[in-house]
Amino acid sequence: MVTRTRFDDSECPVARSVDAIGDWWSLLIVRDAFDGSRRFGEFQRSLGVAKNILTARLRSLVAGGVLESVPASDGSAYREYVLTPKGEALFPVIVALRQWGEQNFFAPGEPHSQLVDRRHGRQLRTLEVLSADGRRLDPEDTAVHKVADE
Amino acid sequence: MVTRTRFDDSECPVARSVDAIGDWWSLLIVRDAFDGSRRFGEFQRSLGVAKNILTARLRSLVAGGVLESVPASDGSAYREYVLTPKGEALFPVIVALRQWGEQNFFAPGEPHSQLVDRRHGRQLRTLEVLSADGRRLDPEDTAVHKVADE
DNA sequence: CCCGCTTGGTAGCATGTTGCAACCAACGTG
DNA sequence: CACGTTGGTTGCAACATGCTACCAAGCGGG
């Protein structure tokens, strides 16, 4: 039952996101959810995480509105964990992490799982940060505009 | 001295990224680095993290090639921590987390720090996952293509 | 309906990690 | 050259993690 936020500078959206996700395991759970995992056992086998940890993480993701616990799709009495719309909105986060990993932690030609366009089976385009008028922005082209309720 | 990776499924780029960053504090350090923080004390004041933790995180980020320790820019004998190219490549990750936070954890009109285009001071466009030919992709339009060295 | 296997957990304990506070050395400034 | 600042290190207490054992509720077959 975590009520207090870990990071005090929570007017920053990045800190709130980080706090809402919880920990790295949670992020990998979300990744697996995007890949089609739904059942407790699927997550557990895929991640190799201890069951009590998985229990806690699933619960906190449900509490945070990222996952939702629904009746199993196969008609059994068990439950499944599926992404809510809020959880689905994490898609760019996962993709960004994936692309960063692909580009920085694999030797050329080293095998790794790949996220592809289902329609043509081709790799995705690398994510780009764009301005309102569509220019590509690098970190130095941006600034943090403090506060301002707008 | 962490040699072993925490997550065994490390043929997955997401897991490798997560492992390279280390923990959430590290990600907030990177965020602050994008915002212009360079000195130990700046990170410490901005994050409110214990100094021993900050020491450890800075070291592991340097070891991981995300940050680099350089002589201070003001001519003093102190050192500064700046993003390497690999660290700068985390930009989309931070932006994605920021946008997710903005869109899901703030009431409309609630104040929060904002990342803007330095040229016009306007908000950024929301990140989009695109196929090679430029179509916008939702999670269900993609699939994980297992292994395959290519 | 009963027996055994699977699923989805909980409980207890050892170990690792975090956070806090105190301390400290090197730097910088008057 | 004395004193505040910067950038740490050390030790310890508290908490989180991971492992293993255990367990109850499905569920399937005979």
Image (cartoon, coloured by chain):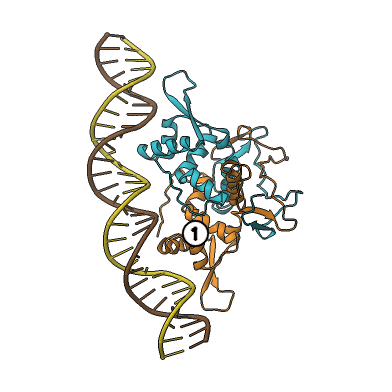
Chain colours: A cyan, B orange, C brown, D yellow
Quadrant assignment for the C terminus of chain B: top right
Q: Describe residue B10's horizontal placement relative to residue A102 as left or right.
A: left
Which residue appears at 51% of the width and 44% of the height?
B12
Q: Describe residue D11's horizontal placement relative to residue A137 as left or right.
A: left
Residue B110 percent coordinates (x, y): 60, 46
- Residue on which the image places disc 1: B47
Residue A110 percent coordinates (x, y): 55, 48
Quadrant assignment for the N terminus of chain B: bottom left
Pick the front one: A12 or B74:
A12
Q: Describe residue C10's horizontal placement relative to residue A27 as left or right.
A: left
Name the element at disc 1.
helix
Please say if A6 is above or below B58.
above
Please say if A12 is above or below B12.
below
Please say if A18 is above or below B66.
above
Which residue appears at 72% of the width and 55% of the height?
B121
For the residue marked with disc 1, what is the amino acid? Leu
Which residue appears at 66% of the width and 47% of the height?
A126
What is the tally of numbered marks visible in this picture?
Answer: 1
Q: Is residue A9 among what the camera can see? A: yes
Please say if B25 is above or below C10.
below
Pick the front one: B92 or A126:
B92
> Please, which chain is the residue tagged with disc 1 on?
B
For disc 1, the neighbor class at 10 Å (few under 14, some 14 to 19, many from 20) is: some
Residue A124 percent coordinates (x, y): 65, 42
Residue A26 percent coordinates (x, y): 47, 41
Q: Quadrant of residue B55?
A: bottom left
